[in-house]
Image (tube, grey):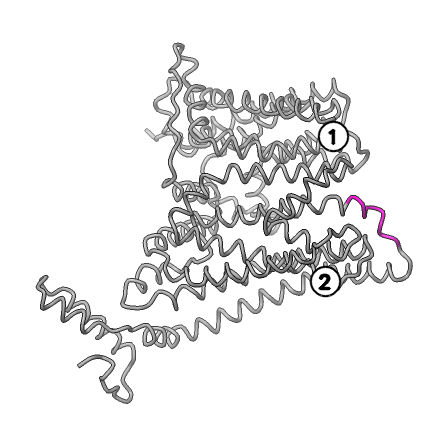
Amino acid sequence: MSVADEEIVPGEDPADRTAQALAADSVVGSVGGSAAGSAAGAADWTDWTDDTLELLRALRAPHRRSRAGQIGYTVYVGVMVVMAWGGMFSLGVFANASMGADYSAHDAQLLAALPSGVCALGLGLILVVARDALWRGPVVAPRATVDWLLAQPVRPGPLLRPWFWVSCAMALVPGLLAAAAAGVAVGLMDKAGFLPAFGWALAGGVCLPLLATACGVAVERYERVARSVRRASPVVALLVLLLAVQSAFAVAGHRSVLLERVEMWSGPWGWSALAGLSPTSAAVSGGRLAAIPLILLTVVAVVLAFRAAAGIPLGSLRRRARAAAGVAAALRTAELRSARLVLAQSEQRARRVRLRIPPPTRAWLAVPWRDLTALLRAPSRTGRAVFFTAPALLLAGPAAQATGVDRVLLTALAAALGYLGAAQLAEPARVEADDPRRAGWSPHPYGQLMLRHAVVPAFASVLLAAAGAGIAVLLGAGPAVWLAPVAALPLTAAAMVNACRGPSRQELMYSPSGMGSMGPFIFLAWYGAGPITLVPALAFALGTGPSLAVAWCLVLGATLLYWAYQRALTLSGRHRPKD
């Protein structure tokens, strides 16, 4: 008799009935591989999805109510923060505008930056979500669901599709905030009104996040799509960077209207710009019609992603659930380095570059040879270094021309971006510092070994900054950008200071300092000691004359290298085996 024909006894626990059925299925499946046993197992198999979900809803009811309260409180706090900081400010400036205040001084620069800027944001959003799907993805169920529940005779669709809708809802939050910010800016500066500007900006604020989420599901579902994303990521990242550079040049007055039209009509990342510009004085002919294909494409993509969510392979779900759980556990314990290592391990399925360079003939070149080999075999690190260094060089020109506080802030922002670029090249030093016992192969003392690890990052940073400065000068930048190669030296030294910090020291978060709850700030100061020290000092140094700036950069670089050396000695002493 099949389970569907069984009579349910009043008062019977659904959990017992589900467990009995699963046990019966396992017994049937374990019968020796005879044809009769297999046929009986296939005939008696029953879809237990509805009963299982009903049981889980009953068991999870107390937790679900508690979780709903937590989510409701989080949403309430978020809404209050947005309304207090954004809503009240917006109401105030619109009230001032209604009484005659003029906010249109920068209207031309805003409208010039929007075409290529919105294209860069849209394309970058799709790239970020697609890359995120390589290790996590929009459809990420808890490990209990993936490891146990999906292995039972249940349909995966009802278990996985709710997580797809959750990801869609979370993706809409930044899109709505961006549309509201665009409505305020365009409504004030171009005097287009908030409601028309916000309404047309919603086309991109809603459709682009949903399209990106659908692309993430495709990456999870199809391995060939994941391989295509890995191969295309450097090219797309370069396009995003070029679009951002074009937007910056447009603000400075160097526009190419024809190129902007081609970019805006090239895909959904540009259709949102066409729709957003519709209520402004820079509206493009036929731009309103771009909202139609954008909406239609979004609807089709969401429907296809909804169907594909149920077919994601179980192995892919398990790998992503474990990676997401590992990253979450590392972040909860402030093990940021461990979180990055988990991400690196989750991408080991990608094809690795196996470049070889001739081994050195001199012993002192052994460490630089290893670091250069590691850098050549991880071209993504060089790509990320370029990605952060390019905007730093773009900010160098405006920072040199600015005065007062604006100059200091722009210089500090450029220094912070430059540090992020230099830090990408210091990975071999960080690997060596994760466990000082790995340095047993080297005949050099540990402190000297870490200093030798600074050679390749320093040369690579200087060459990258020099190449970027040369390109910037050819494009019309001032001579101030030639300070970038000199500034690369202290930036690399700051990266070495952070590399020599070693494993995370969570005990600092609970240090009895006698100053109240200062533990988290002490931990952050230890974790980011290099950039926290360098960025303000470099902002001051670059604000002086060229000669003094060069001298200050050299002094800062030497000081930070000595600090890195002392940190390495301390680190090796902590890990030295006791007699």
Pick out the residue farthest to the front: 286
The three-letter amino acid code for the residue at tag 1 is Gly
Q: Position of residue 542 (x, y in %)?
A: 72, 27
Q: Residue at x 42, y 40 (%)?
A: 344
Does residue 133 sit above or below 440 in this rendering? below
Which is more foreground, mark 1 or mark 2?
1
Q: Is residue 103 left or right of residue 306?
A: right
Q: Residue at x 91, y 58 (%)?
A: 100
Q: Residues within 10 Å of mark 2 (few under 14, many from 20)?
A: few
Residue 84 marker = 2
The three-letter amino acid code for the residue at tag 2 is Ala
Q: Position of residue 245 (x, y in %)?
A: 67, 36
Q: Residues within 10 Å of mark 1 (few under 14, many from 20)?
A: many
Residue 8 marker = none
The reply to whether callout 1 and callout 2 are in contact (CB within 8 Å) is: no
Q: Is residue 140 left or right of residue 168?
A: left
Residue linked to disc 1:
397
Please tell me whether mark 1 sits on a helix, a strand or a loop: helix
- Residue 221 image-quadrant placement: bottom left
Q: CA distance from mark 1 to mark 2?
A: 36 Å
Q: Position of residue 406 (x, y in %)?
A: 78, 38
Q: Is residue 266 left or right of residue 180?
A: left
Q: Is residue 276 left or right of residue 50?
A: right
Over which residues does the magenta segment extend? 102-109
* Quarter that holds the C terminus: top left
